[in-house]
C-alpha cells in the first residue's frame, strides 16, 4: 500500500510539474507575442512619422509608365516598325506592370490613411504648407492615371464614372483651396509661395480633363482643361520672373524642376483627348515641353547636389520624362516622319531606363527611403505655413 501511495504522489508531482511547465511556456509565448507586437507597432509608428505625400511620386512614375505602354500597344494607324513590333508583344508584361503600379499605389494610400488617423497634426501641417499641399494632388493623379490605363474597366462604364468622381472631387477641393488663396491674398502672395511643385495642381486638372474626355464628357473636360491651363499660364510667368523673397527649395529637391516640362506635356495629351486629334495646339504645347526639357538637360549643375546621395526625390525625374515620351509618341503618330520617330524612340528609351534605374536604386537603398534627413520633412518643419 505504501508503494502504491508513493507512486500516486510521484504521478501527481509529474502532472503538477507538466502543468506548470505548460503554463510557463504559455506565458513566455504570450510575453514574446506582446514584445513582437510592440516592436511592430513601434516600427509602423516610425514609418508613419516619416511618411508624407511626396512618396506618391513613385506611384506617379509607375502610373504614367503604364499609360505610356497602353498607348503604344493600342490601336494606331502608324505603320512604323516600332509600332508593329510593340503590337506583337504579349500583353502579359503590361498586366504585370499595371498590377505592380496598383499594388504600390494601394500600399502608399493605406499608409497615408493610417497617417491621417494617427498623425493628423502632421497631415494638417502638410495641408497648410505651401510646398506640402501640392503633393496632396499626387495620389489622386496616380489613381486617375491607373483608371485610364485599367485593362478591366472601359471608359464609358458605370464603374469608370464612379471612380472618376471619387478621384476628381478631392482635386477640385484642393483647387478651391490653392487657387482661392492666389486670387484673394494679394498681389505679393503668389510670387512668395509659388514653386515648381505648384505645377502638380495644374497637372491634376489636366489629367482629370483627359480622363473625362475618354468618357465623352466634352464640357466637363473643357472645364477642367481651362481651369488647369489658365492657372498654368499664371504660374509659368510667376516662376519665370523669380521674384526675390520667394521659396528657395533645397538642392535635394532640384529634381522637381522637371515638372516644368511635365505640365505642357500633359496639356498636349489632354487637348488631344478633347479634340480627338494632335492638332496645332497640342503640337505647340509639346514643342514647349521639349524646349524646357532641353533647357534643363543642358544645366546639369542644377541637379548636382541632389545626385550625390539617393533619396525619394529622385522619383521626380520619371513622371515628367514618361509623359514627354507619351506626347512624343502621339506627335510621331500624327506627323509620321523619320525624325519624329527617332525622337520618340530616344525619349522612350530614356523614360524606361530612368524608371528601371530608379527601381534598382530603390531596391538596394530601402533603408534610405525613410531618411531622417528627408528634404520634404525639413521643409515642413522650417518653412512658414500658409493658412
Image (tube, rainbow, N blue to C red):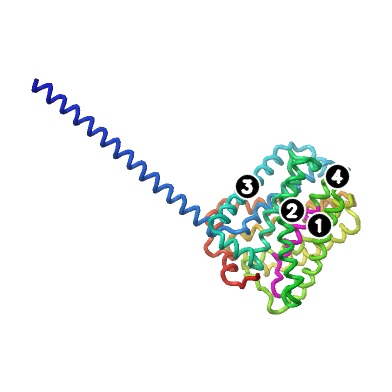
Residue 224 numbered mark, or none: 1
The answer to whether residue 303 is magenta is no
Residue 80 numbered mark, or none: 4
Residue 255: give x, y in percent of width and height: 67, 63
45 horizontally vs 293: left or right: left
Q: Is residue 64 above or below residue 96?
A: below
Query: In which quarter of the view is residue 157 placed?
Result: top right
Mark 3 neighbour density, 10 Å: few (under 14) some (14–19) many (20 or more): some
284 horizontally vs 8: left or right: right
Q: Which residue is mark 3?
A: 106
Mark 1 neighbour density, 10 Å: few (under 14) some (14–19) many (20 or more): many
Q: Which residue is mark 2?
A: 168
Query: In which quarter of the view is residue 183 placed?
Result: bottom right
Give the Cα separation between the discs numbered 1 and 2. Answer: 10 Å
Q: Earlier in the sequence, mark 1 or mark 2?
A: 2
Q: Earlier in the sequence, mark 2 or mark 4?
A: 4
Q: Nearer the viewer, mark 3 or mark 4?
A: 3
156 horizontally vs 50: left or right: right
Give the Cα separation between the discs numbered 4 and 1. Answer: 34 Å
Amino acid at each position: 500500500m505504501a508503494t502504491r501511495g508513493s507512486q500516486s504522489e510521484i504521478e501527481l508531482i509529474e502532472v503538477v510539474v507538466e502543468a506548470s511547465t505548460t503554463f510557463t511556456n504559455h506565458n513566455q509565448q504570450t510575453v514574446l507575442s506582446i514584445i513582437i507586437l510592440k516592436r511592430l507597432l513601434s516600427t509602423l509608428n516610425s514609418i508613419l512619422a516619416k511618411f508624407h505625400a511626396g512618396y506618391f511620386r513613385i506611384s506617379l512614375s509607375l502610373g504614367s509608365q503604364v499609360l505610356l505602354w497602353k498607348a503604344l500597344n493600342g490601336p494606331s494607324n502608324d505603320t512604323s516598325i516600332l509600332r508593329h513590333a510593340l503590337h506583337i508583344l504579349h500583353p502579359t508584361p503590361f498586366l504585370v506592370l499595371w498590377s505592380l503600379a496598383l499594388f504600390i499605389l494601394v500600399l502608399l494610400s493605406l499608409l497615408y490613411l493610417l497617417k491621417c488617423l494617427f498623425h493628423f497634426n502632421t497631415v494638417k501641417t502638410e495641408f497648410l504648407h505651401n510646398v506640402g499641399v501640392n503633393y496632396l494632388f499626387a495620389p489622386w493623379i496616380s489613381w486617375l492615371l491607373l483608371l485610364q490605363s485599367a485593362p478591366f474597366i472601359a471608359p464609358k462604364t458605370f464603374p469608370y464614372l464612379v471612380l472618376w468622381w471619387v478621384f476628381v472631387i478631392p482635386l477640385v477641393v484642393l483647387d478651391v483651396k490653392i487657387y482661392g488663396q492666389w486670387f484673394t491674398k494679394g498681389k505679393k502672395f503668389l510670387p512668395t509661395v509659388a514653386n515648381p511643385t505648384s505645377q502638380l495642381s495644374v497637372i491634376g486638372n489636366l489629367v482629370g480633363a483627359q480622363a473625362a474626355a475618354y468618357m465623352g464628357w466634352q464640357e466637363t473636360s473643357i472645364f477642367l482643361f481651362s481651369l488647369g491651363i489658365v492657372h498654368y499660364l499664371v504660374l509659368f510667368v510667376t516662376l519665370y520672373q523669380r521674384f526675390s523673397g520667394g521659396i528657395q527649395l533645397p538642392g535635394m529637391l532640384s529634381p522637381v524642376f522637371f515638372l516644368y516640362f511635365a505640365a505642357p506635356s500633359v496639356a498636349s495629351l489632354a487637348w488631344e483627348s478633347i479634340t480627338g486629334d494632335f492638332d496645332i495646339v497640342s503640337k505647340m504645347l509639346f514643342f514647349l515641353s521639349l524646349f524646357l526639357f532641353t533647357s534643363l538637360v543642358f544645366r546639369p549643375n542644377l541637379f548636382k547636389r541632389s545626385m550625390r546621395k539617393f533619396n525619394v526625390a529622385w522619383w521626380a525625374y520619371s513622371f515628367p520624362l514618361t509623359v514627354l515620351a507619351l506626347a512624343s509618341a502621339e506627335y510621331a503618330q500624327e506627323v509620321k516622319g523619320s525624325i519624329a520617330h527617332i525622337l520618340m524612340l530616344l525619349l522612350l528609351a530614356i523614360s524606361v531606363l530612368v524608371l528601371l534605374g530608379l527601381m534598382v536604386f530603390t531596391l538596394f537603398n530601402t533603408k534610405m527611403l525613410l531618411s531622417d534627413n528627408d528634404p520634404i520633412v525639413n521643409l515642413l518643419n522650417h518653412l512658414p505655413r500658409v493658412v
